[in-house]
Image (spheres, rainbow, N blue to C red):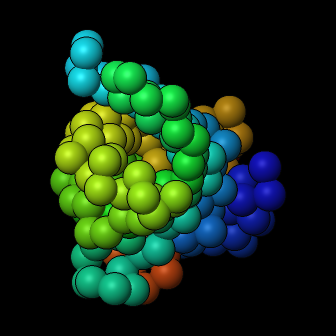
Amino acid sequence: MLHALLLTLSLSSHTSGPIDITEQDLTSYVNQNARYQQQYGLPGLFDVDVNLDSMRVQLGRQKAGMAAVQGNGRFTLSLPGKPAVDGTIRADFEAKPRYHLQTGAIYLDNFTLTSYEIKPADVQQQFAPRVGYLVQGLQTRLAQQPAYMLNTKDKDQRWLKQHVTGFELLPGKLRLHTDTTGSAE
């Protein structure tokens, strides 16, 4: 809610020219709207229930043109003949931000796992072969779900959506460029 207010305030004073969406805006939006919970497994081999509780987005800081996304969560791993194990997971990804003009949404494409850590440590070896399933599930989910979307119920954001002509990724922010011919309704 706070990020929408800050964006509205910036729009009120800048109804033409570039508008910045910060990594804090994206992080807040993702944590409020893009919950990730996945259950998967192979019968007789394993079952995993994964919940990512929080995500953090950094823009253009580690690699130009790319976003770094860190997901933190918990899981339950069940293996045949063994008691279920509860643990935590931290997964670091890199992804390419994309702005979709028609919907006013920012998506994160081409997710690549760069590192992960699982606790308890003794589960790391058991869980490592299954991390691919987590990555595929997260890639699919976030490719379909925006990391940020302009709120068309807000008149300033509706105006912005109608006038964005492009975007660029700068360290810490996504800059939306607008045409200068319109004015807020």
- Residue 161 visible? The answer is no
In the rendering, at what x and y percent does residue 169 appear?
A: 35, 75
Residue name at image x 26 percent, y 60 percent? 113
Residue name at image x 72 percent, y 59 percent? 3
Residue name at image x 27 percent, y 83 percent? 63
Q: Quadrant of residue 92?
A: bottom left
User: In screen coordinates, is 113 left or right of 34?
Assistant: left
Q: Nearer the viewer, residue 160 or 125?
A: 125
Q: Quadrant of residue 122?
A: bottom left
Quadrant where the image shows the C terminus: top right
Q: Nearer the viewer, residue 84 or 39?
A: 84
In the rendering, at what x and y percent does residue 145 appear?
A: 41, 35
Q: Is residue 139 above or below residue 175?
A: above
For this orientation, the residue located farthest to the top is 43
Residue name at image x 45 percent, y 63 percent? 121
Q: Is residue 78 above or below residue 96?
A: above
- Residue 61 visible? The answer is yes
In the rendering, at what x and y percent does residue 39 appear?
A: 42, 23
User: In screen coordinates, is 59 left or right of 4?
Assistant: left
Q: Nearer the viewer, residue 51 or 42?
A: 42
Q: Is residue 14 above or below residue 111?
A: below
Q: How many labels, in total? A: 0
User: In screen coordinates, is 154 left or right of 146?
Assistant: right
Q: Nearer the viewer, residue 134 or 172?
A: 134
